[in-house]
Structures are given as structure tokens and as C-alpha cells.
Image (spheres, coloured by chain):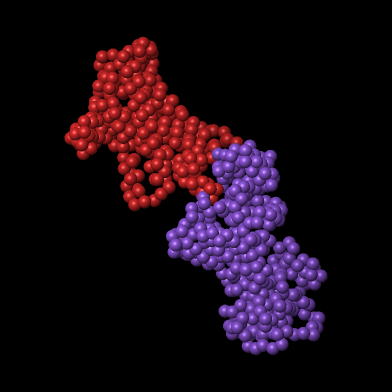
Amino acid sequence: MRRAQTFTWGGLVVGLSAAILVAFIGIPVGALIARGFIEGDVLAALRSPVATTALWLSLATSAIAVAVAVVLGTPAAYLLARRSFPGRSVIDTLIDLPVVLPPVVGGLALLVALGRHGVIGGPLDAAGVDVAFTTGAVVLAQLFVAVPFYIRSARAGFESVDRRLEAVSATLGAGGWRTFRRVTVPLALPSLIGGAVMCWARALGEFGATIMFAGNVFGRTQTMPLAILEAIETDVDAALAIAIVLIVLAFAGLLVFKGLARLGGRVL
Amino acid sequence: MIRAGIRTTVGGFDLAVDLAVDREITVLYGHSGAGKTLTLEAIAGLLTPREGRITLHDRVVFDSSAGVDVPPQRRDVGYLVQSYALFPHLTVAQNIAYGLGHLSRDERRGRVERFARMFGVDDLLQRRPARISGGQAQRVALARALVREPRVLLLDEPFAAVDSSNRRTMRRELRQLAQRLDLSVVTVTHDLTEAYNVGDRLAVIDRGRVLQAGPRDEVFHRPATARAAELLGVQNILPGRVVGADGGRVHVATGLGMVEALAESCPPADHVQLAIRAEQIILERPDRPSAERENRFQVTIIDEAAFGFSHTLVVRVDDAASGAPTLEIDVPAHPYQVLNVPTRRDWRIHIPPEAVHVIAD
């Protein structure tokens, strides 16, 4: 039974500060959406070549980035959750680094490593492979900033799986791979999907590393956030339309993530 | 048959266990933290000992000197972990079928149905583990462990999550099951009553060492060391010295006075510990003359506690040397009433010589 809420000055202060914060985030977002629909024609602007091209490029690159993040990040997350090895905390911190690093620094680092004269880029260039300023570079930039979101969530998911279940699975004849597939992954699945969704949302909004490492080339490296930057000077309606699409996708992504977190809590 | 002789260290805890189990139920009994679960894990292959050798039905599954370490999935051991660890995302049927991946779909279904019936969970097959009771979970976990028809079954505190009213049935069923499926069973418990009721053989484990192992009654009535006696619930342990022997008896000088014990049970030692179970000491009225004087002591009751079916009296022997221990005596409810114990503090006790177990010190 809930106790009846009575008025207190403390309660008023807490409620007010919460209201200010909600307004601080809600008003700009609401204003942007309102302006897009009232003063401009969002739906028409979305059909402009700048918007459609950026939209498809963004969806394609972020999908590839998430796929790579899941394929490479899942084993890493499992190792971090289950094994202790020398340098574990260093590696753990390194993987988290892109979350706090300014993305433009990440882009610069990628450029230094993979640019034409970089440690990896040099030999690649000699072999005739260009990485920087290509669509591939967009994917790499997104992967760089977004993969920690997947690994963190996946790792927490693996850590939440009772190890006795894995031990029992082994005594029931299942090898490591079968146990991973039939017990560990299903039980960590809400965290894995949630992490992938967060990773995707972050990749979709990637700007700083992309512009540094991939540039802003229409049709090749110009994803939605970069298209906003260009369109804001020539076609405000298009900029607003793309921004609204990003807001909607980000919001949907968060809803899915939270829904999965609740689902995970209920199943286990 | 299980033969395990292993040495290892886990987080600063030393485990050095030697265990031999035949086709029967062996209870590994000890306090929590004694190394019971670690021993099971080593047999199941979930823990790799530093050194030693483990054979299951003459098959070497671990031998540090030969570099053999068969992984758990190929040891063919049924292992029931504490609180059962059913897979929460699978139904009861899927839990039981989990270890049958090598069979065809039809064989699998048949086997699951047969074992579900055997354990009385055939009406729960489509339920999730979150929606069944503790007793049902235990049955499902047992079915899951045994559906692969292992020859070795390891049980970690199998009755802990079961109502005490269901325990008795389950113990009987476990004994029948072990016979029917020709299983070597090792079950772990910290509960002495359970250890006594379930096991054919008893192994007492303490601080990572097996203190004593053997047929249940022998271990229960003839603890090998004072510590084993203590763990096996012997309330009275008296240090003493063997001063003579005649006519099948040995005379042991203790702080209570001279105590007679059967010579056949006496180890060849001077310094000994006498282990006497509280329920084997007889309370007598002090005013009734007794023809025999041996092992009879005048005592005063200094404390008392009731446990429903029996009363535990703590008594001091009147002529005891200073510093001599008090004795505990269990008196069943009926003689307690007949003797009208509460009416007086001074009594006489009789310790039958056959109730005195002599341990070399």
C-alpha cells in the first residue's frame, strides 16, 4: 500500500528541479519538431536527394558497424566477464575509452593510424587499399565510438548469468560452445540486444570521428548528422527533417533498450 | 565405483581428500566450508586438482601424473548442484531433455516422458522452473541428471530446499533409485540426521580432510578421532589414561573417576579419549541401592533443556576432580516423567561399558 503523499517544502524543491530538467531537454526537442512541421514541410524535405541519400548511407553504415561490433565484441565481452588474465583492467579501460573521448580525437587517431602515411594505412596504401575518406572509413569511425556501448552491456549480461548453470550444462554433456549457445547467450540475450540497440543509436548519431576520418562527401561519407551540418546553410527544412528522423530513431532505440531491460529482469 | 585421491588449494583453502565409494550411497558429512562441494566439483570435473587421481568405475578421469583430465561433459557423471540450478529459460521438458542432444527427436521424447513419470513431474512438462515448487524442482533436477543414465550421481545438499515433511519420502526414494539404476551415489550434507538416514557409508570431512570413512554404523558409533566424534554429535568426550585391564575390560582413569570400557574396542594406547553419547547414559534414582558399583556416579543436575521428545540434562559428577568436564545426558520423555526428574537435583548415572568408545589420543 502506498502512503498518501503530503505536501512538504523539500518535496516541492525536488519536484521543481526535476521539472526544470525535463523542460530543459523536452523544450528544445519539441521546438525542433514543431518548427519542422509548422514552418516547413518535413515530408517534402525528406524526399530531397540530400536527405534520402544521407538516410540510406546512415542506415547501411550503422547496420554494418553494429554487425561488426556484435561479431567482434561478443567474444571480448565474454572474456571480460568470465576470465581473469593479466592486463584485464587495462584492456577493460581501453575499451571504455571511446565513450569519454571527444569523437573528433577518435577520428584523428584513426586518421593517424589508417591514413595514407599511418602505421597500418601506409602498408595498405602500398597495397593499393585506401581507407580514409571512404564509406568504409565511416563504418570504422562509427565502430570506434559505438562498440563500447555494446561490449559494456553484453559484459553485464554475461556476468548476470549464474555460473552454476554453465557448470550444470557441462555435466549434462555440453561442451563449451554448446553451453554458450544454449545457456549463456539465451540468458544474456536481453543485454546483448539492448547493447546492440544502444550501439546502433550511437553509430547513427556519429559525427566528430566521421568528419575527421571520412570527411563529408555527398553520397559516399555524408551520413545524416553530417548532412545536417551542410543543409543548415542551404536548406533548413532538409536539416530539420533529418534531425527529426534522428530524434525519432534515437527515441525508438531507447524505448526498445528499456523494454528489453525490463523483460530481462522479468525472465530471470 | 569412485576412487578419488586429490590435493589442491582453492583460495587459500587446502583440500586433501581420499575417498572410495562403491555401489551404494556414501554421505559426505561435515560443516559448511569443510570442502564437501569442492570434492564433488573435483569428481565432476568442474575443478581441476593440483595433483591426484580420480577413477570412475575403473575409468581414469583425472591423473595429474599421467596428464589425464577428462572434461566434465565426458565424465558421465550426474551432478545435482545445491538449489538445483534448473535452466530458467527452458521448460521442465526442455530441462530434462537438455543432456540428450545425441539422441533422435523420438528417442528423446520417449526418454523425457519415462523419466518425468519416474519422478512424478510428468504433469509439469510445459512449465517454467519459476512456476514449480522447491520439491518439484528437486525432482526435475534429478530427472535431468539421471536421464543420461550415468553410473555416478553426485548430490549437493539435495534435501535443503525441500519441506521436512517431504524429506523422508525422498530419502527412501533415493535409496530405491540407487539400487534400481545401479548407481554409485555421493551425497553431501551438513545435517547429521540426514547423514544417518540416507547413507550406507559415511565419510566425515573437516577442514579439507576426510577424518574417517566407513560403514555408517561403524563410523557413527566408533569415531576414529575426538574431532570426528565431536562432528558426529558425541556430546561427551573425556580425556583419560588406561591404567589396567582384566576380564575383557579396561580401566580408564578420568577426571570423573575410574571408567570401565570394553577391552575389544580399546586401541593400544595409554592416553585416550572416551566418547560417550548422551542418549546412552542411564539416569537412576540415587536412593535405590545398586549391586554393581562400576561406571556409576553420583551427579547433580546443573542445567536442563527440553527438545520435545527428549530432555537434555547437564550434570556435574559429585566426586569429580576440579576442572573435570560436565556430562550431557539425554532422557526420553517417558522415563523423564516416570522418574519425575524435576523433583530433585541429585541423581545417579550409569554408563554401560559398551557405550564407552575409546579413541587413541
Q: From the viewer's perspective, is residue B243 above or below residue B221?
A: below
Residue sitting at x 53%, y 54% = B75
A233 over A133 or under it: above or below: above
Question: Which residue is found at the position 50% from the left and 38% from the top?
Answer: A186
Q: Does residue B50 appear to the left or right of A229 in the view shown?
A: right
Return the residue nearer the eye: A96 or B1: B1
In this rendering, the answer to whether B153 lies above or below B245 is above
Q: Is residue B230 left or right of residue A258?
A: right
Camera sees residue B15: no
Left or right: B251 in relation to A68: right
Query: A67 or A107: nearer the eye?
Result: A67
Asked whether, in this view, residue B221 is left or right of residue A41, the answer is right
Residue B307 against residue A126 in the figure, above or below: below
The answer to whether residue A193 is visible is yes
In the rendered image, residue B66, in percent from the top left (x then y), is placed at 44, 62
Q: Quadrant of residue A38?
A: top left
Which chain is red in the rendering?
A: A
Residue A99 spot, x, y in % from top left: 33, 37
Residue at the location (66% across, 67% down)?
B216
| Pick the front one: A236 or A35 | A236
Give the quadrant of the N terminus of chain A: top right
- Residue A78 is situated, as x and y percent measured from the top left of the image, at 42, 43
Q: Quadrant of the C terminus of chain A?
A: top right
Instruction: Indicate the chain coloured purple by its letter.
Output: B
Q: How many labels sit on residues?
A: 0
Q: Residue at image x 64%, y 43%?
A: B111
Indicate the quadrant where residue A206 lies: top left
What percent of the width, then of the height, locates residue A230? 26, 19
